[in-house]
Image (cartoon, rainbow, N blue to C red):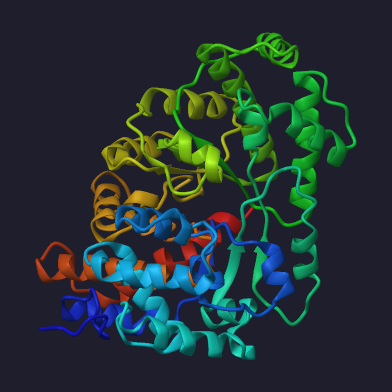
Amino acid sequence: MKSFLGKDFLLNNSTAQSLYQHISTTLPIFDFHCHLDPQEIWANKPYENMYQVWLSGDHYKWRVMRMHGIGEKYITGEASDWEKFSAWAETMPYLIGNPLHHWSHMELETFFGIDKSLSPETAREIWEECNERLQTPDFLPRQFIERSNVAFIGTTDDPVSKLKYHQLIKDEPSFKTEVAPTFRPDGALFIERPTFNEWLKKLEKVSGQDVGSVRDLVGALRQRVDYFNEQGCRASDHDIAQMIFTKTTQEHAEVLFQKRMSGQSLTAEEIIDYRSFLLVELGRMYAEKQWVMQLHMGAMRNNNTNMKQKIGPDTGFDSIGDSQVAEGLSRFLDTLDGTGELPRTVLYNVNPNDNAVLSAMMGNFYEEGVPGKVQFGSAWWFNDHIDGMEKQMKDLSNVGLLSHFIGMLTDSRSLLSYTRHDYFRRILCNLLGDWVEKGLAPNDLPTLEKMVENIGFYNAKRFFTER
């Protein structure tokens, strides 16, 4: 019987163990999509306690705490930081089988050297030991990044952001990790939101351009794309709840824009028409800058209206959608490809039923000399567990080229989440080792080691940085 989180954790055969020990433990991390706060990295201030670095803002943890019956007071409410940590410790023993149980204990062991299981009985001891270490120089934000061997961080940024802290980090010679912005234009695309007009005013202010028409909007967004590019941006990111696409003229989009600006509501079809037009315009800008376009598809967000009104959006009340993605995605990518303006693209799905759809779709579009121009992104959100990661890689392998896969990302707000890369690499090594043991892949360690190196780091580095 193996020990919990032992050195061969998730490595169930000798080939996997060899691959992991010789390759994965030395690879840097290329974290091309996350939600870290650049101001937090720049300020590099010590955390007061484990709640701040571990639980604050983590809707993954909040969600399972609610499932366990913990009151909101101890999740996002007025309880003390210790009380919230204690409530998380109360939840932990019930998480066996959930990836959070693995991740949390990996984070405690990797960063704090704690190999005890977190529970109500050990909560106070672990709380005090971690808090004591958090006050030392080795446990500051930048030190967590450096200890994790992170070469690149791609944050997620609103086009109206001035990117002040990205520039400050860039000008700090002692910090070697590159922190680049990612262009996330949700404010422009979700014309139906009550905050749309307010967001346009922010865009006008930061761009110095009046936005009274769709033409103006495209021009202001182009100005921001230019600015983000100057600040080292290499990618965009999009929340696509339903990948429905229609070819729309600028004239029609203008009518819809003016209708919305006059205070009228748009129909569902009109919203799709407007968003389709703007997505194409943005895709052309990305291609011009040689950015990567990321499409996160299929999430049903903020399902609990009551809780959204009480504590706000994006607080752990999201789930898997069942939208159809194939036809709309094909039309969108084909529209850009038809004019030679399809950027390198990463497709993510939150519904595992869409794995085969995206694996097949990526083979429809290519560019000579660019391996894997359209990528099936790593298992996302409700899929980033052992079964989900294995399924994503197997489905990709069955109809595509796993060797060109760009691998793992954190998609997290916590600096402790870099252990997820180790989790992924162990699963990758075990998958390849299992194929060797079953005679489904050659026992060619040099080739397999190169494959793990590329998927673990180099493919993503090339995909996001080579222009």
Relative depth, front residue between 317 and 144: 317
Quarter where residue 335 is shown: top right
Q: Is residue 77 above or below residue 218?
A: below
Report the front residue among 447 and 139. Answer: 139
Locate residue 422, reporting x and y percent: 38, 73
Report whether 45 appears left or right of 215. Answer: left
> Looking at the picture, how far across and down is residue 190, in whole percent?
61, 28
Name which residue lies at 65% across and 52% down: 234
Can residue 75 be seen by looking at this rendering? Answer: no
Q: Is residue 217 visible?
A: yes
Residue 231 image point, x, y percent:
77, 56
Which of the 4 image quarters holds residue 300? top left
Residue at 61%, 88% in the rendered image: 135
Residue for point 42% across, 77% down: 107
> Which quadrant would residue 320 be assigned to in this image?
top left
Name the residue rendered at 55%, 60% in the picture. 78
Left or right of 208, for residue 438: left
